[in-house]
Amino acid sequence: MSIIPPYLVSGDTIGLICPSGYMPGDKVETCCQTLLAWGFKVKLGTTIGHQFHYFSGTDERRLHDLQDMMDDEEVKAILCARGGYGLSRIIDQLNFKQFRKNPKWVIGYSDITLLLNHIHTQYKICSLHSPMAAAFNDGEHENEYVHSLKNALLGFKQNFHCGTHALNRTGIVEGKLVGGNLALLAHSTGTASQLKTKRKLLFIEDVGEYIYAVDRMLHQLKRSGQLDHLEGLIVGGFTDMKDTAILFGKNVYEVIHDAVKEYDYPVCFGFPVGHQKENYSLKLGVEYQLAVMEQEVALNDLG
């Protein structure tokens, strides 16, 4: 059974860190101001605004910052300011003893997919695949996607809808929601962070990949059995896709469709999640209903 961390109330503290790539300190100001306006307190980690080449700090600094936030009993949720790359360098050194005693919401996406899935695979603790600090900038802190994070933290059940797609496969199913960035799901295969997808609702998204690389990653999941026994598949945004000089011959959604055409579970394309403005907050490890219908697609929180 999944462990759902306590939902937040006014006055609770949210820790803000960069456990992977570097993010300038001024890029998190609107996020901090918005969290305060929502009624929360904010605690900044030492990696915010700090830079060590590509990263927000050395492996040691990023490890200690994340560990401190996980162990701090006053911090009720941890919002990762950005993804990038770096969690796989430190995740096996994390100590989850205190975190398991006092579970809290870990929030993010992209490279943070690794951490979200690790804590669910290993400890059955739910987390939030959600917009991060940059999503609050440029006047976007008031949009429905950022506000879905507030609603999720406060414990409101949210039902999301999107339009249909020609490649959709219809059906209505229920299951625990798991997934995230496709590159990180493939990267986790064969490790302690690999998802257990049997009877789950899996969602995938990615950015900036070559189409052939998406095909390769899907076959990595397929060969490892991670696509075999799903309840359903949710395909989010695959933005800024690239092709090679000799064209692959299919667009990215056609590649995904072909990879799962032998299965009979429902599949929807174009769900609003991913490296884009349209990125709803989804609770990983929580029960959802996926309804892929002729008129629309609905993802309903049952948790």
Image (cartoon, rainbow, N blue to C red):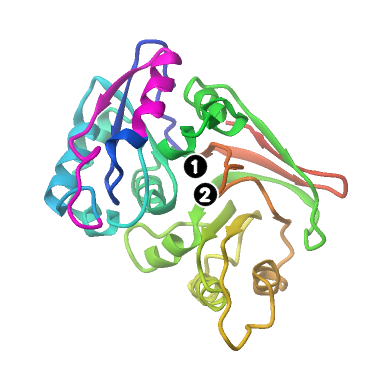
Q: Secondary structure at mark 1?
A: strand
The picture quadrant where one finds residue 239 is bottom right
Up the image or down, 64 lies above or below 114; here it is above
Which residue is drawn at the image coordinates 30% and 51% (left, top)?
21
Amino acid beneath label 1? Leu
Q: Nearer the viewer, residue 143 or 73?
A: 143
Q: How far is the residue under mark 2 from the one under mark 1?
A: 5 Å
Up the image or down, 140 lies above or below 87; here it is above
Q: Secondary structure at mark 2?
A: strand
**Mark on residue 62?**
none
Residue 198 visible from this viewpoint: no
Where's residue 9, x and y in %? 42, 13
Q: Nearer the viewer, residue 96 or 242?
A: 242
Which residue is drawn at the image coordinates 45% and 16% (left, top)?
38
Where's residue 78, x and y in %? 33, 32
Give, as a single range, the part of the protein colored magenta.
28-54
